[in-house]
Amino acid sequence: MPEPTPLLDEALDRGDAVAARRAVSDVGGRGDPDRVLDLLGARAAAGSPLATELLVEQLDESGVVRRFVRRALLDESTVDDVCQDVLISVATSIRSFTGGSKVTTWVHRIVRNRVVDHLRRQRTTTTLPDDDLSPGDRMSSLIATRATVRDALAALPALYREPVTLRDLEGLPYSEVADRLGRSIGTVKSQISRGRALVAAALEDAV
């Protein structure tokens, strides 16, 4: 269990996203990014939705997931999709994180599994059944068709809700979503991946 940080813990307890992000930045600024992930992982595993949100953000922003995926895949065009699948898996399975290892070690195991799944799907030439779609494709389809998922989407911070709504409910291409929101395509893709992961986590908690 990582050493507690009172400011972060208090912000998470209050559900204060602004103060929590400030505390995360402060801890990360001390030169130990793994500690930030371990702190957030422990709180997310204990059931904090805000900690889960921040953990997904940190894993994405820090490039940890992308580095792991790139080491395993030669096809750069598939990296974004597999990274999204990893973030969804992290968000939906964080309760299984026991703190017996670093978050990065736990995430690396998830990356390996998602890479294997991706390569298996690539080898399949027949149409895949719905339960064999990638986590990202499955979540996109769910958001577009299920009212309960839309409720989870409505509860997202606007930063993520807007691009996911435009992409998965309105079916706009990434380029048009970026134009509508005045953001770069890379930013929009990242925000949609995180948003889908957070919707998946909310649905997992609701089960």
Image (tube, grey):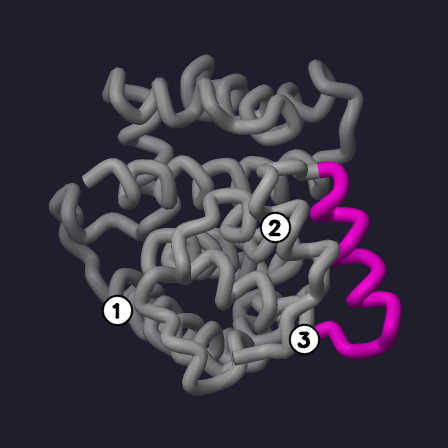
The answer to whether residue 74 of the structure is visible from this angle is no
Q: Identify the residue shown where x is 37% and y is 76%.
A: 98
Name the image quarter holding residue 55: bottom right
Is 129 placed left or right of 198 in the picture? left
Labels 3 and 1 touching (C-beta < 8 A): no
Tell me the amino acid under the disc marked 2: Leu
**Pointers 1 and 2 in contact (C-beta within 8 Å):** no
Instruction: Determine the CA span between mark 2 and mark 3.
Output: 13 Å
Residue 44 is situated, as x and y percent measured from the top left of the image, at: 47, 57
Magenta span: chief secondary structure: helix
- Identity of the residue drawn at 67% across and 75% down: 35
Which residue does the image show at 87% across and 73% down from the upper left?
30
Residues tagged 2 and 3 counted as in contact (Cβ below 8 A): no
Judge by depth and name the residue closer to the eye, 54 or 46: 46
Q: Nearer the viewer, residue 111 or 175?
A: 111
Residue 39 image position (x, y, % from top left) = 60, 68
Residue 53 visible at all: yes
Q: Is residue 31 magenta?
A: yes
Which residue corresponds to mark 1?
A: 120
Q: Provide the residue designation for mark 2.
A: 54
Which residue position is annotated with label 3? Answer: 35
194 and 102: which is toward the camera: 102
Is 73 on the left-hand or right-hand side of 149? right
2 or 3: tag closer to the N-terminus: 3
Extent of the magenta region: 18-33
**Does label 1 or label 2 sit earlier along the sequence?**
2
Of marks 3 and 1, which one's residue comes earlier in the chain?
3
Label 1: state its secondary structure. helix
Q: Secondary structure at mark 3?
A: helix
Tell me the residue at 31%/68% (across/down): 96
The quarter of the picture where the C terminus appears is top left
Instruction: Give me the C-alpha separation between circle 1 and circle 2.
Output: 31 Å
